[in-house]
Amino acid sequence: MPQFDEEGFNNMQSSDVEEVLNSHDCEVTENELLELSEIKQILQVMPQFDEEGFNNMQSSDVEEVLNSHDCEVTENELLELLEDQSSDEHDNEETATTMTKFLTLSDLNKIISTAQHLEDLVFQMDPSLERSLKFKNGLGGLLLRYKEI
């Protein structure tokens, strides 16, 4: 399994993706390869987010997710991840309030425009309109706090 430095996935190489794929017994379909390509494009956008984003993600986090299921993530697993994230956000509400004191208008505009760019990428790349709309709605809900500031 490849090791990532503190910058997380910013230094991810295609050989790292291949190594992860080869380390699992799952057969990779053409659709999954396309999804990996989309993931790499999203990862290229991720450095625009603040330090608390994906930069703190470790390879052990990825390994844990990959090893926690056979080959396919179920809808229930995705919902559980979202619920965990929501509870973490609630726990860190006081920290988030403190952090907003340091956000500038320029920072807020950058966050919102980057999210819009990500939304556009999903609509361009994902053939499923239903999934794209769910993503847009979810992202819009997450951005609501920033838009209210």
Image: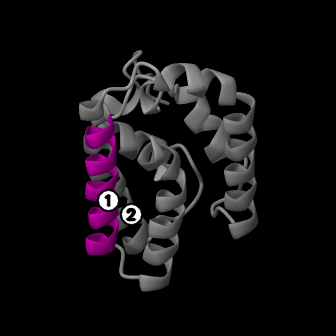
> Which residue is nearer to you in this view: 34 or 1?
34
Where does the magenta region start and end? 108-125
Magenta segment includes 101: no
Give SS at disc 2: helix
* Residue on which the image places disc 1: 38
Which mark identifies residue 70? none
Estimate the x, y position of residue 109 in percent, counting from the top left. Answer: 27, 42
Estimate the x, y position of residue 121 in percent, counting from the top left. Answer: 27, 63
The residue positioned 31% from the left and 30% from the top of the image is 10
- Residue at the extreme front: 149
The residue positioned 32% from the left and 43% from the top of the image is 43
User: Where, by quadrant of the figure, is residue 111 drawn?
Assistant: top left
- Taking 122 as reference, is 94 left or right? right
Above/below status of 75 relative to 10: below
* Residue on which the image places disc 2: 35
Q: Looking at numbered disc 2 in the image, what kind of residue is underneath it?
A: Glu
